[in-house]
Image: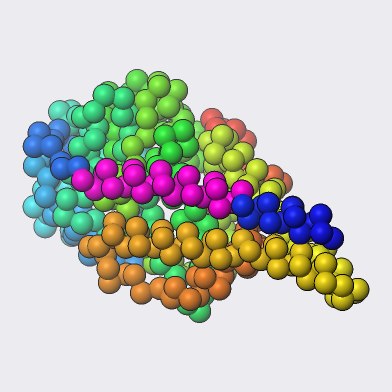
Amino acid sequence: MLVIAVFLVSVTVLVAFVQSLAFARLVRYVEAELARQPGQQLPKASVILPCKGLDPAFRENVEKLLNQDYPDFEVIFAVAQESDPAYAHLVELASQSPKPAKVIVAGVAAQRAQKINNQLHALEQIRSDSDVLVFVDSDVIARPDFLSRLVEPLTEDGVGVTTGYRFYIASPTNCAAILRSLWNRVTAWEMANPKFAFAWGGAMAIRKSVFTEAGVRDAWDKAADDDLSLTTSVKKLGLSVRFVPQCLVASDGDAPFGEIMEWTNRQLILTKVYYPELWKRAIARASFMLVWLVLMLIATGSWLVTQEPAGLIAIAAGFTIVPVEVFFLLKARKLWQKILLDHSDHLTESLLASCMAIPLAHAVLPFMTLASLLTNRIQWRGVTYELKSPTETLVIG
C-alpha cells in the first residue's frame, strides 16, 4: 500500500510540474497578445454566419456583429430553410444593418454537416474583392473591436488562421455544466501551445488565398466539422493557428445533463476524426488519470476492509492532487477575468462549486474521454452523423 501512496504522490508532483509549465506559457502568451495594438490597415472582409434556430440573446448578438468597429466588411447569413426560426429575424436585421448584409437559403444537406453546407453556400455569395473570410456563430457576444482583433494577426507572416474560443459559465447548481466548464478550460490552455492550437468555428478568420491554397472547400465537401478540418488543412501548409485572447467568448454553460453529454461526446469524436494528434493527447491524459482513479479505489477499499494506516496514507496521498488543481483553477480564473473584462457581468459562477467539482471531474471525465474510442457517431442539433473518415460523413437523420 505504501508503494501505491508513493505512486499517487508522484502523480501529483508530475501534474503540478506539467501544469506549471503550461500555465506559465499561457500567461506569457496572453499578456503578449493583450499588449498588441490592432494595425491601421485592415483588409476587406466577408463574415459568414450559419444559423439554425434561435440561441439565447440571438438578436442582440447579431446586432453587435453588424455594428462592428471595422472599416469594410459584409455579413452573409445562411440558413437551411426559410422555415428556420432564425430566418425572419435575420431578414429584418439584414435590412436594418449599417453594413452590407444578406440572407441566403442553403437547402438541407445530404452528405455533410448542415453548418458546413450553409457555410459553403454562403461562400458562393461573397463579394469578389474581400481578402479575408471570417466565420462566426450566432451565440458569439462580440465586443466592438472583435473583428479588428480577430483579423489583424493575419497580416503577419506564417499565420494561417486566427481564432477565438468559448468560455462556458455554469451555475453553481448544475453539476454537469460545471464539469463541462472545467473540461473546456483545460482545453483552452492548449490554445497557447503552437503545436496543438486549433481553430474554433465560433470565431475564426482566414485569408481567402490561404483558404483556397489549403483546399478547405474540398476538405469541407463531405465533412461533419468545419474548424478542425480547416485547422489540419492549414497546418499542412506549414502555417500556424493564432489564438486571439480578446476574442474569447463568454457563453451560458447551463444545459440539461443529456445535452452536455452529447456535446462532450461530439467534441471528442470530431477531434478524433479531424485532429487525431490532439485527441491522442486527451486519451493519454485520460488513461493516466484512470490509473490514478483505480489506485485510489484500491487504497479506499483496502482501508475500509483492513483499517490499516497505510491505506489511509495512500488515500491522503492521492487527494494531494486536489489542492494543486484548485491552485491552478484560482490562478487561471484571474487570467480569464482579465481577458473577459468586457463580459464581467457573465462571471457570476460559484468559485466554491467549481473547486468542489474537481474530485468529481477526476472520477468522471476520464471515462467520458475514453468513451470516444468506441464510436464515430455524433448528434448535432437534432441530426445524427456517422463520421466514416475526414472526407466521408453519413447523415443518418
Residue 186 % position (x, y)? 49, 53
Say which residue appears at 8% left-offset and 52% top-offset: 98
Per the rendered image, the range of residues in magenta is: 14-35
Quarter of the image for residue 341 reads bottom left
Q: Quadrant of the N terminus?
A: bottom right
Say which residue appears at 50% left-offset and 75% top-offset: 353
Say which residue appears at 39% left-offset and 63% top-offset: 333
Residue 115 % position (x, y)? 41, 46
In reply to whether residue 209 is colored magenta, the answer given is no
Above or below 263: residue 203:
above
Q: Nearer the viewer, residue 178 or 71?
A: 178
Is 120 on the left or on the right of 72, as rendered? right
Question: Among all residues in the image, which is located at the extreme bottom?
Answer: 173
Quarter of the image for residue 37 reads top left
Question: Among all residues in the image, which is located at the extreme right?
Answer: 306
Q: Nearer the viewer, residue 290 or 62?
A: 290
Residue 127 % position (x, y)? 18, 33
Magenta segment, principal secondary structure?
helix
Q: Nearer the viewer, residue 135 or 22?
A: 22
In reply to whether residue 20 is colored magenta, the answer given is yes
